[in-house]
Amino acid sequence: MENEETQKQIAQLQMLEQNMQSFLMQKQSIQAQQVEVENALDELGKSSGEVYRIVGPLMMAAKKDVLKSDLESKKEVLALKLKNVDKQETQLREKAQKIQAEVLEQIKKEGGKDA
């Protein structure tokens, strides 16, 4: 009976690991977007002439202050998304560590019975 429970916990650990990998990929994607936004803001700050916005396959003239406001807003949204992913990742990691400790304890107990 205990071995069955241990197997379930191991399967749950594997699922948690897959979820953590998914969060890692999301995190990397958000961080890449943050870098793009930061670079765009830097370049926007350096520009003194006309600025353009890419909309689908088109490049359209844009007002610098509107573009800057949009980029700042996107930067804030990305920061919130990253914070949320970090929080979820931490919760998953804590849950995985707890289950792992339980599994190891159970394995030790089962190993002691065989000796």
Image (spheres, grey):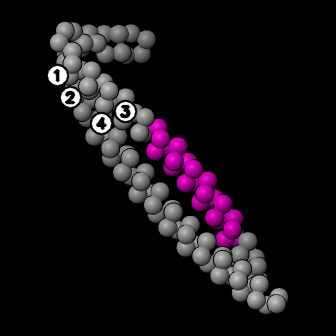
Which residue is identified by label 3? 35
**Does residue 8 appear to the left or right of 25 in the view shown?**
right
Identify whether 50 is placed above or below 75: above
| Disc on res. 75 | 4
Q: Residues within 10 Å of mark 2 (few under 14, many from 20)?
A: few
Which residue is identified by label 2? 69
Determine the residue positioned at 55% across, 48% down: 22
Q: Is residue 14 inside the magenta stretch?
A: yes
Q: Earlier in the sequence, mark 3 or mark 4?
A: 3
Bounds of the magenta segment: 8-29
Residue sticking out furthest to the right: 114
Q: Earlier in the sequence, mark 1 or mark 3?
A: 3
Q: State which mark lies toward you, 1 or 3.
A: 3
| Disc on res. 76 | none
Image quadrant assignment for residue 115: bottom right
| Disc on res. 65 | 1
**Does residue 25 appear to the left or right of 115 in the view shown?**
left
